[in-house]
Image (spheres, rainbow, N blue to C red):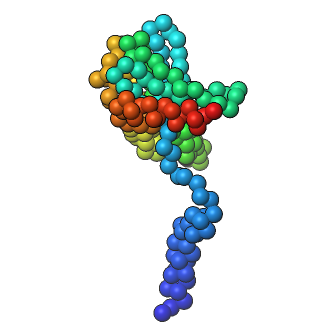
């Protein structure tokens, strides 16, 4: 085996080793990676009153939110009647930081390339063409990223139980609990947040 082959193998092994997560990371942190919490939702009633909190669940009559008090350390459960709700919006995390990265790493270098060509060759038209052609991948990236961004789920207008079923997957308890389950869930929430 030649020295180049041995060097390449060692380089690949070092690169692959950097991708590993040591066992001590799993053993020492004991943190839950996935949260059992529901998504944050914003609820507006017909009287333009607004609430924001964790979506716990809903039944045939109410939407239940866990309202966190930022000044104090306790939380409370709020039940909002479904017939009074005019607008619900699920506040999902959507990454919109890609815009600056596409501009900074694709479009701006294309413009610099065109300006460099124009100044070197003394041809402004050629520099504009060079910048335009080399900015096409950045423009396509920007277009594809903007089209693929998920919309935040929301309901407007007259909201009823059947429409709310579409938002159930964002709740902490993604089902309609029976009265016994509802009592136990609410009782446990009150105990845990006192």
Residue farthest along the front direction in this orientation: 180
Residue farthest along the bottom direction in this orientation: 1
Nearest to the observer: residue 99 or residue 26: 26
User: In the rendered picture of this protein, how many numbered marks are placed on residues?
Assistant: 0
Residue located at (37% from left, 13% from top): 83
Find residue 62 and report its horizontal and vertical position in percent.
41, 20
Q: Quadrant for the C terminus, please.
A: top right
Nearest to the observer: residue 6 or residue 109: 6
Residue farthest along the right direction in this orientation: 71
Residue located at (50% from left, 49% from top): 34
Left or right, residue 132 beside residue 15? left
Find residue 114 and report its horizontal and vertical position in percent.
53, 43
Q: Quadrant of residue 59?
A: top left
Vertical relation: 161 (above or below) 110: above
Residue farthest along the top direction in this orientation: 47
Nearest to the observer: residue 73 or residue 125: 73
Left or right, residue 115 beside residue 134? right
Residue located at (34% from left, 22% from top): 60
Find residue 150 and report its horizontal and vertical position in percent.
40, 35
Find residue 133 and report its horizontal and vertical position in percent.
43, 43
**From this viewpoint, is residue 126 visible?**
no
**From this viewpoint, is residue 160 visible?**
yes
Residue located at (60% from left, 34% from top): 193
Vertical relation: 119 (above or below) 78: below
Vertical relation: 194 (above or below) 162: below
Left or right, residue 58 beside residue 127? left
């Amino acid at each position: 085996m030649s020295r180049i082959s041995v060097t390449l193998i060692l380089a690949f092994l070092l690169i692959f080793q950097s991708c590993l997560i040591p066992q001590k990371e799993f053993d020492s942190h004991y943190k839950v990676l996935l949260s059992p919490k529901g998504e944050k939702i914003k609820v507006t009633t017909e009287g333009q009153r607004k609430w924001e909190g964790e979506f716990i669940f809903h039944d045939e009559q109410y939407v239940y939110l866990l309202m966190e008090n930022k000044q104090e350390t306790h939380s409370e459960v709020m039940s909002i009647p479904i017939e009074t709700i005019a607008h619900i919006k699920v506040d999902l995390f959507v990454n919109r930081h890609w815009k600056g990265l596409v501009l900074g790493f694709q479009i701006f270098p294309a413009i610099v390339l065109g300006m460099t060509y124009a100044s070197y060759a003394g041809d402004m038209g050629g520099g504009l063409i060079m910048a335009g052609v080399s900015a096409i991948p950045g423009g396509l990236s920007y277009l594809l990223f903007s089209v693929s961004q998920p919309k935040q789920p929301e309901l407007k207008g007259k909201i009823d139980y059947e429409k709310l079923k579409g938002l159930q997957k964002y709740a902490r308890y993604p089902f309609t609990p029976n009265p016994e389950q509802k009592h136990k869930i609410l009782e446990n929430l009150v105990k845990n947040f006192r």
